[in-house]
Amino acid sequence: MSLRALLLLIIGAAIVAFIGVNWGAMTTPTDLNLIFTEIRAPLGLVLLGLMALLSAVFVGLIAYTQGTVLMETRRHAKELSAQRELADKAEASRFTDLRAHLDREVTRLTETIASNTRETLSRVDRAEMGLRDRPVDQEVGRLVQAVENHNRDLHARVDRLEMGLRDGLAGYVPAPASVRPAIAGTPVPSAEQVDDDPIGTAVPR
């Protein structure tokens, strides 16, 4: 039991006790002036009836006020529920639009990635086919062959140069020692040295 209900119960019990104690005085008839006329009735009972009427009117007003507040609360609750439903629908619509947009973007990105992947694979395939058409061993063999040809050409040129030098020096006869001028400080070769060195390499220069 709440404190308010307990307080009302105590007040009601006090009023009943007061009426019970003073019941005799309350039921004593008395002349009452009603402005337009006069009647004879117990004043206590009349006042008790007026108090009961006022209490009933007060309770009725409280009930009406509470009922009005309750109806307004229910109406506001319904309006809030309707607004919440509208907001939820709008939010769901926005989420749906966002999801559709994301799905479109994901689909576009997937198609782009797939296209780039196909293009890359096609380029790799073309590169592999090009390497198969022109293998590395063939290129290396071609380079080796070119180097060997160049070496043979150089050897042939060196051989021709040596043969030319030999042919040019074959008929060379060195001059006698008496004809060649002697250089100061240089020994004159003997006849045996001249015979052993027909080319004249023993002659100091």
Image (cartoon, rainbow, N blue to C red):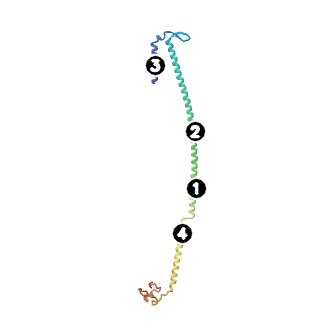
Mark nearest the camera among 3 and 1 is: 3
User: In the image, is residue 35 above or below residue 95?
Assistant: above
* CB within 8 Å, label 3 to label 4: no
User: In the image, is residue 159 above or below residue 193?
Assistant: above
Cα gap from disc 2 to disc 1, whole angstroms: 43 Å
Closer to us: 84 or 41:
41
- x and y percentages locating residue 6 in the rendered image: 45, 22
- x and y percentages locating residue 143 in the rendered image: 54, 69
Name the residue tied to disc 2: 90
Does residue 20 appear to the left or right of 90 in the view shown?
left
Residue 143, disc: 4
- x and y percentages locating residue 195 in the rendered image: 45, 88
Cα gap from disc 2 to disc 3, whole angstroms: 56 Å
* CB within 8 Å, label 4 to label 2: no
Q: Amino acid at mark 1?
A: Glu
Name the residue tied to disc 1: 119
Name the residue tied to disc 3: 11
Label 4 packing within 10 angstroms: few (<14), some (14-19), many (20+): few
Q: Residue furthest bottom?
A: 178
Cα gap from disc 3 to disc 1, whole angstroms: 96 Å
User: In the image, is residue 191 above or below residue 28?
Assistant: below
Displayed quadrant of residue 205: bottom left
* CB within 8 Å, label 2 to label 1: no
4 or 2: tag closer to the N-terminus: 2
